[in-house]
Amino acid sequence: MIAALPSGLLAMLPRLKDKGYRLGRTFLTGLAAILPLAATFALLAWAWQLLSAWLGPSSMFGSVLVAIGVSVSRSESIGYVLGLVLLCVAIWLLGVLVEAGLQVGIKRLIDRLMQRIPLVRNVYDVITRMVELFSRKDTEGLGSMSPVWLHFGGRPAEDAQGSDGQKVAVLALLCTPEPVVMDGGRRYLGVLVPTAPVPVGGGLLYVPEDWVSRADIGVEALTSIYVSMGLTTSQYMNSLTPAAADEKPPAISGEDSHKSSAT
């Protein structure tokens, strides 16, 4: 009986391994199913904590709102809400003045005051330009940015064969259709190459104009490709027919850039 026990255990090992494999596979399947939902809630919770740290009642901004609202109510929470409401009303009234054109004199006074402070004027100038960029129309501000292909070393020649016809192509974002003239009259374009999986950062490159060609996708597709680290590439780029896929995208030129930005 004792001698037969080890052999019985050895016979059960394959079954135990099979059951363990099934249990592990079922667990991993459930984990893969709940992971997107859990990651979404974790990201939202992180964003909420970040906003609370920056704008909550315990932050420097929130302490100012609490100080404004506490004069009306002794409760810190109610004081924060009242301060936030008063701030929104003040911003709305400022918007009314801006639409009526009555803020020009005040803005000039603030600009002159900020320009007199050595360190503050540089920060104020950069932030002012960024706000103006976001406030422009679609064809003048961020809307003029469009996805492009960046061909390092230039686009392959039409009759290039082998490795000469295959060059690195990077999906990037054209900053502005206006070329920059330098190096004795050569035209360059500013191209932003994002990073994955967070396309907020990246590198700003000024490359020859003939290195850049239009990409027949939108900014949303470019963002999706970078955020997914390339997993959604086929969703946006394999929809071309074989004949269209063989055609090379046209290069970016000054006239084409103006036409594309105007549309």
Image (cartoon, helix red, strand yellow):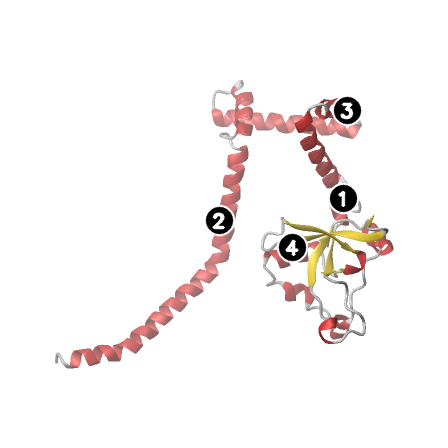
Question: Circle 4 sits on which residue?
Answer: 223
Q: CA distance from mark 4 to mark 2?
A: 21 Å
Tally of marks: 4
Q: CA distance from mark 3 to mark 1?
A: 23 Å
Q: Position of residue 253 (x, y in %)?
A: 84, 57
Identity, as a three-letter code, of the amino acid under mark 3: Arg
In the foreground, 86 or 43 = 43
Q: Residues within 10 Å of mark 1 (few under 14, many from 20)?
A: some
Write the residue at 30% across / 77% down: 14
Q: Earlier in the sequence, mark 4 or mark 2?
A: 2
Identity, as a three-letter code, of the amino acid under mark 1: Gly
Which dot, 2 or 3, sits closer to the camera? 3
Question: Is disc 4 placed on a helix, strand or loop?
Answer: helix
**Quarter occupied by residue 222:** bottom right
Question: Circle 3 sits on which residue?
Answer: 108
Q: Earlier in the sequence, mark 4 or mark 1?
A: 1
**Left or right placement of residue 165 versus residue 78 in this view:** right
Relative to residue 80, is residue 233 depicted above or below? Answer: below
Pointers 2 and 1 in contact (C-beta within 8 Å): no
Identity, as a three-letter code, of the amino acid under mark 4: Thr
Identity, as a three-letter code, of the amino acid under mark 2: Ala
Pointers 4 and 1 in contact (C-beta within 8 Å): no
Write the residue at 51% across / 36% down: 52
Q: Earlier in the sequence, mark 2 or mark 1?
A: 2
Question: Circle 1 sits on which residue?
Answer: 141
Which dot, 2 or 1, sits closer to the camera? 1
